[in-house]
Image (cartoon, coloured by chain):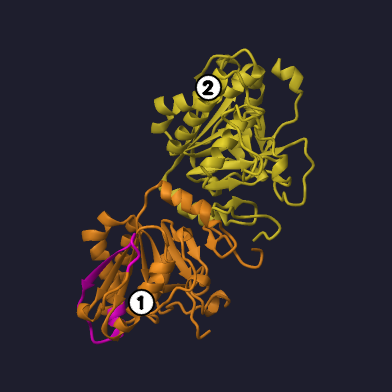
Chain colours: A orange, B yellow
Amino acid sequence: RRDVLVLTPWLAPIVWEGTFNRDILNAQYMQKNLVTGVATFAVKKYWFFVQGFMSSANKYFLAGHQVNFYLFTDNPDHISHLQMAPENNLFVIPVQNHSHWQDISMSRMDIIRRYIHSQFQYEVDYLYYIDIDVQLFEHIGVEIIDALVATISPWQYTTRRDSKPYETRTESQAAIPKGEGDFYYTASFYGGSVAEVYKLTRACFKGVMEDRENGIEARWHDESHLNRYLLYHKPTRLLSPEYYWDEEL
Amino acid sequence: RRQDVLTITPWLAPIIWEGTFNSEILDGAYRPLNLTIGVTAFAIGKYTRFVGRFLESAEKHFMKGYRVNYYIFTDNPETIPNVQLQPGRRFVIVPIKKYPSWQAISMRRMEAINKHIAETSHQEVDYLFCLDIDMVFYNSWGPETLGDTVAAIHPGYFNVPRSQFPYERRSSSAAYIPDGEGDFYYGGAVFGGLVKKVYEFTRTCHMTILTDKANEIMAAWQEESHLNRYFLSHKPSKVLSPEYLWDDRKPKPPEIHLIRFSKVDKNYKEIRD
């Protein structure tokens, strides 16, 4: 691929179709006997997306490898029987809902952090958060596996740094100084080793709480905090917008 | 960015070329880790004459601002010159015996490095590079080279089709690579990585070298053949472009913007006797 950037200035690969050979990567992954988890939330009306997400993820997400799906929901009864691939596991975890979607969005980070600490770290090596309202249309495989992985947001991929929608108000913990920032990452798909995801979620939630105490809310909520974290803790691998697209674009 | 060369392997290991990385960002990430980088180099027989230039140029260009330990393996400690080092950088002489032929000397490097890691350097360094001594640093060699397992593309074969790679082609050798297989032709003069990984790699290579010895076969390019066999099965996590392993005798092609580390021209007959 010569038409796109395949390596960041800090030498993290940017994963695009055509840059990798999945067979080689599968062989490496299987050698190490790794288990990967996916955390996702279906709160309030979002239970509607569960079926579509789970059936496409079972078919296309790390197909052939063991995946533990951790489905957080406020409505466990509404989750109809889901067909899982034989190598995968589903854990339905009840959570409380909040009145505002931004609160649900922001508290996700803390929930993930807590569950890594109490459970996930013993069950998986790598953990990815993915929004529930997505569907996979193509294979997403072990090319995503690395210590700290972020996805370039489809909206901002082609814009120059100055127009990326970072939080700029210095009162917010998510603030990124003008002119800085490598890429704009989406909060809809990120992950890495459980240790790194723990650190990321802890830092982001801390920023969220401090902002709340100071009466400010970041422009794009937890996504703003994520972007700030990743500016100062550079991802070891980036996923191109092929990995999280928006059909409205 | 570089569009004229391959900058990432099919297993998503970066290939390091000038223009692919930002040294400031990398230093910002690596310096705070307080790493110590080790270098092994073998100066046996007449090869001790290269030590001075190697070290002086390393002091100017190799991992500036980091702690460095140079381990010079030699059969002739008295001939090693005393080179002035920057603060935070150390020089250690490791005495070893001289083998009768240059091929044997070359092949026994793996064993010597492996033994030394187990006895000494695993406690002293985080990363270890194993370099040939008859080489000089001309430009910066920095943290862009650090990785779990690091190999360098041989300057003679980076632009050449795979069928022409001088892999060992006899199936009776433990270094055998069949036609149609192989990613790159890596040079034996540069390899490295986390000290633990270099330990594993040198142990395996030493084993395959001994296996060949027992079967009375010597691989086409000595331990370089075994190194290539190893890196085919255990793909490096980072690959250095030929900027990091050049040869002064070769004219510079357009893809090479910067020569960082290069083999000095010499009279092979005279020096290897």
What is the crowding at mark 1: few (fewer than 14 residues within 10 Å), some, or many (at least 20)?
Answer: many
Q: What residue range appears in magenta?
A: A84-105
Q: Label 2 lies in what chain?
A: B
The magenta stretch spans residue A104: yes
- Where does label 2 land, which residue? B210
Q: Position of residue B239 (x, y in %)?
A: 58, 46
Near-viewer residue (B139 or A76): A76
Tell me the element at label 2: helix
- Where does label 1 land, which residue? A132
Q: Position of residue A245 (x, y in %)?
A: 49, 77
Q: What amino acid type is highlighted by mark number 1? A: Ile
What residue do we see at 23% from left, 60% from top?
A: A119
Q: Compared to B243, does A167 lie above or below?
A: below
What residue do we see at 71% from left, 58% from top?
A: B4
Q: Compared to B82, does B160 lie above or below?
A: below
The magenta stretch spans residue B98: no
Q: Position of residue B68 (x, y in %)?
A: 49, 36
What residue do we see at 45% from left, 34% from top?
A: B200
Cα distance between the residues tagged 1 and 2: 55 Å
Q: Compared to A19, does B133 lie above or below?
A: above
Q: Compared to A208, does B100 lie above or below?
A: above
Tell me the element at label 1: loop
- Note whether residue A72 is visible: yes
Q: Label 1 lies in what chain?
A: A
Left or right: A169 with respect to A39?
right
